[in-house]
Amino acid sequence: MNSETSFYINPASFVSDQSIGLYDGAIGNAILLFLLSGSSGDGVYKEMALKLLDSVGNRIAAIQSTSFSDGLSGIGWGIEWIAQNDFLEIDTDEVLEEMDDFIYKSAIYSLTDDLSLATGILGAITYFHSRYTSKNRHSHIYKNIFFGGIGTVLVNRILDKGKYPDLISASKKYEEGELVTIGLVGVFLSHLLKIVSNNKKSPLEQALYDITGFIHKFLEQNTGNETGNETNGHKDVFLFLASCYYLCGRNHDLNIWQVRGISFIKEFQQKATSVKYKISKSIFLADLILQQPTETDLNDDEMPICLTSVTGKKIIQDVALQNKINFDTAVSLLLLR
């Protein structure tokens, strides 16, 4: 067992023959292996990560889906993430050139109403936002047109949907996936506003206030609620929304949202009485916000190991609490679910 990690992970456990996608496939596992390599100094992790990247390169031609969870948007985002975090020195403009064109055309001509990160509009714009923030030396077409082209088109779709009662209605009962999307849209808008210079209150900022207002009211209504009657999903979605609320405040530099977010996190953590809840996917992000490790009994036999599994999230949290990656970098991974 390495002294830098709270549990040992066999590098061979990360081999995936089923998928090369981000959430539960090779590109996501490569990210975890690079994190473990940087944290532990064990070169075996990096060697395995490079082998997984070779596997991605050999099999990517067969991928037609542009989804973020298991398609091209997520794979491209993963490659960009690896480059931006200095695990590989590559020119992503060259590596992702064909993928850029394919995803761009798919996103522009798509008529989907799906706002989700995993399979919808938010996944496409998250990919192009990562391309906008690339560290490549030369300017690139998708960096130049992010706000004037693809970014504007996709953000406007989110804003249009954000005003509809079916997204942030005070009267409906929500499925877990709908609530996750609301939280993620809020975090993305707050992050985007950090790089948009505008002295006047924009539709982007108004949408952020609408969404955080909804989250605040929703969480208040469920404080002290033992049955979670506002959602048909698992109770850990409340903890996820509380974390998103805090992140919106952190990104938008509003202390009151951060204070309220932490208060909500602590409130819903106190309800975490079952073992399953204590190792839910949301607990790792919440504990990172509180700067405390999540107590688990994970070991080398814990399966599956992938970017969005409980084990994957524990690895990300461990590396962040060791200060091997910064808070925002860890959050970008812990938000995936």
Image (tube, rainbow, N blue to C red):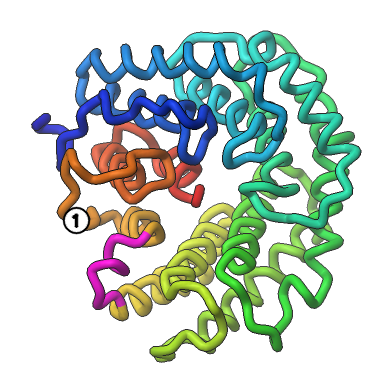
- Tell whether position 267 is magenta: no
Residue drawn at x 26%, y 42% is: 318
Tell me residue 144's x, y (percent): 81, 24
Q: Which residues are magenta?
A: 272-280
Q: Quadrant of residue 168?
A: bottom right
Residue drawn at x 55%, y 9% is: 90
Tell me residue 84's x, y (percent): 52, 23
Tell me residue 197's x, y (percent): 76, 44
Residue drawn at x 66%, y 29% is: 72
- Tell whether position 276 is magenta: yes
Tell me residue 303's x, y (percent): 29, 44
Q: Is residue 115 left or right of residue 152?
A: left
Asked if residue 49 can be seen in this view, the reply is yes
Q: Is residue 139 left or right of residue 284?
A: right
Asked if residue 259 can be seen in this view, the reply is no
Q: Which sits in the foreground, 178 or 335?
A: 178
Q: How many marks?
A: 1
Amino acid type at image mark 1: Thr
Q: Which sits in the foreground, 64 or 36?
A: 64
Q: Residue furthest front?
A: 18
Query: From the image, which quarter does the N terminus lie in?
Result: top left
Q: Is residue 236 above or below residue 47?
A: below
Q: Secondary structure at mark 1?
A: loop
Q: Which sits in the foreground, 154 or 105?
A: 105
Q: Is residue 268 above or below residue 300?
A: below
Q: Quadrant of residue 205?
A: bottom right
Residue drawn at x 34%, y 53% is: 288
Q: Report which residue position mark 1 lands on.
A: 296
Label 1 CA crowd tier, 10 Å (few <14, some 14–19, many 20+): some
Q: Is residue 68 left or right of residue 154?
A: left
